[in-house]
Image: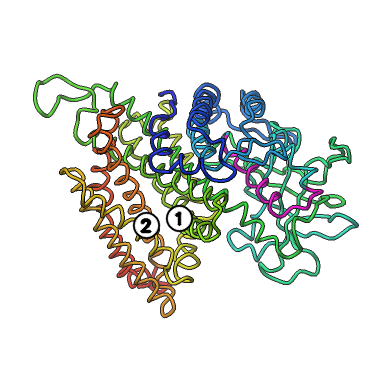
Amino acid sequence: MSDYKAPLRDIQFVLKELAGLDVLAKLPGCEELSGELVDQILEESAKFSSGVLAPLNRSGDVEGSVFENGQVRTPRGFKEAYRQFVEGGWNALQFPPEFGGQGLPKIVGTPVMEMWKSANMSFSLCPLLTGGAIEALLLRGSEELKRTFLPKMVEGAWTGTMNLTEPQAGTDLGLLKTRAAREGDHYRVSGQKIFITYGEHDLAENIIHLVLARTPEAPPGVKGISLFIVPKFLVNADGSLGARNDVHCASIEHKLGIHASPTAVLVFGEKEGAVGYLVGEENRGLETMFIMMNAARFAVGLEGVAISERAYQQALAYAKERIQSPDLAGGGKSVPIIRHPDVRRMLMSMKALTEAMRALAYVVAAAIDTAHHHPDKAERAKQRAFVDFLIPVVKGWSTETGIEVASIGIQVHGGMGYIEETGAAQYLRDARIATIYEGTTGIQSNDLVGRKLAREGGATAKAVIGLMRATDAELARAPGEDLAAIRASLSAGISAMAECVEWIVKTYGADIKAVHAGSVPFLKLVGVVAGGWQMARSALVAQKKIASGEGDQSFYGAKIGTARFYAEHVLSQAGGLRDTVVKGAAGVMALAEDQF
């Protein structure tokens, strides 16, 4: 099993050359964002991730979290690692200084989170949920709730959860039954929630549950949902912890992967009812929960990037060490398997897909910061539309691709990949949940074609296509066979995406089922083309660096070679995906229910 080493060189390249770190540093509120500061943060994060979190990944998977006598015990080493995490200030990185945070922008937090997730996905899920809860409180919580809960949550001394799902209400939250009855300045919450990540654990002294529930007078369906803070321990006026609240863990799930992350069944109100505090207004809880979910969807998309990176590193190390079969070019002597063309193809697939996903995610992170900090209102709106369009793609395409890359990693290992002791199988098992978390790929694609495309007549999609065509024009002016090959595939991919956008806009009103039948292939098409767009931008930068003799020439040469591979092996899928989107609905709906 290989050790994790943060891919700092590629991270720095993407931040500076594609995400525009220097431009972001000029925005109001980002003036302290120097390249030197970012490099220091990344280097420290790399040390923590590789030195503290990564060694617990395998042992945590084997040991798992354990539920005994109503308590959850995380695997050995997790409590100590979490203490170091909090003491290092990592949880506070992106949150406002007024609550004890460091106030750094998304573009800094994104690569740091990627490293945590690569090193130990199970561990990383705890701060992910805490961050989502903090975001919701920052935007919709009362001043009193913020003062009471945010300082400890930002520090990481208290963690947060999201409580949506119930046994009868998964995606359809309109069916939830958890109740909240007003009692003075608070509510009494009763009901059951399932699939609650880190809903119970021994890492922190308090857990702050954000819970969707209905008040007695609430209208039916999603319009009658409110959001409440329900702490595990009540908080006294002086900030100290008080009595245990009426919320308890009934069990934790036995899962395919992420064994070290406890997924809890929580019961609220077995006795007098759990004390809860309203966040925002009654019957508007779903709006606030979507704040948490959007932040979480981006973070879950990063899990696809992170797992891909870890699986690639392990497969690469194995391919360099494993001696098997003679070189096809002759010689008769067995060689490391990395010299065999098909193994090389698999490794290039893993590398190219990982770099494309990382580039797209970081560019979206930069747009999030621009949408937040840019002084011009029109530019903020433009960047927000860009982010909203691509968030489902970052989440859906990256997580689906993460499964693909982890599976390829097992194939590189051959039979040894199927053996748990090598560790390759864990990445596939851990990756599998990410396409389900925070809305399945089908939910992301429905959001993409419906709310993000058809509703606005494809305006943002067409604007993104315009940005892609500008890169295509740059490629047309660039010399060399490599960039010509990249351009040919990118141009065809952009055209395929544009054709689908026009078809979806035209068809949505007349035959909505036909559009949604091809929504997942469309999401994949957008991911493939957007990833190819970023790989083409990488190749353009690399070619200029090589021409000027600047920097690490081998690194830049690899950038061009990897971008060409992506163009010819991944972007080449765009035409087929277009046909599936535009022509495939009849086959999807061909059978009656009793014919299945």
- Horizontal side of residue 544 vs 288, given as left or right: left
User: Measured from the top left, where is residue 85 in percent x and y?
Assistant: 62, 28
Q: How is the image coloured?
A: rainbow
Query: Residue flagged by tag 1: what amino acid is it?
Result: Leu
Give the x, y percent position of residue 557: 24, 33
Image position of 320 (left or right of 72): left
Q: Determine contact: label 1, label 2, CB under 8 Å.
A: yes
Q: Foreground residue, 422 or 485?
A: 485
Q: CA distance from mark 1 to mark 2?
A: 9 Å
Question: Eyeballing the image, is 11 above or below 266?
Answer: above
Q: Is residue 261 magenta?
A: no
Which contiguous range is marked in magenta?
Answer: 124-145
Say above or below: 208 vs 11.
Answer: below
Which quarter of the figure is the C terminus placed in?
A: bottom left
- Residue in the picture at 70% in, 71% down: 220
Task: Report the residue marked by disc 1.
Answer: 390
The three-letter amino acid code for the residue at tag 2 is Val
Check disc 2 and report its element: helix, strand or loop: helix
Disc 2: which residue: 526
Q: Which residue does the image show at 67% across and 37% down from the upper left? A: 101
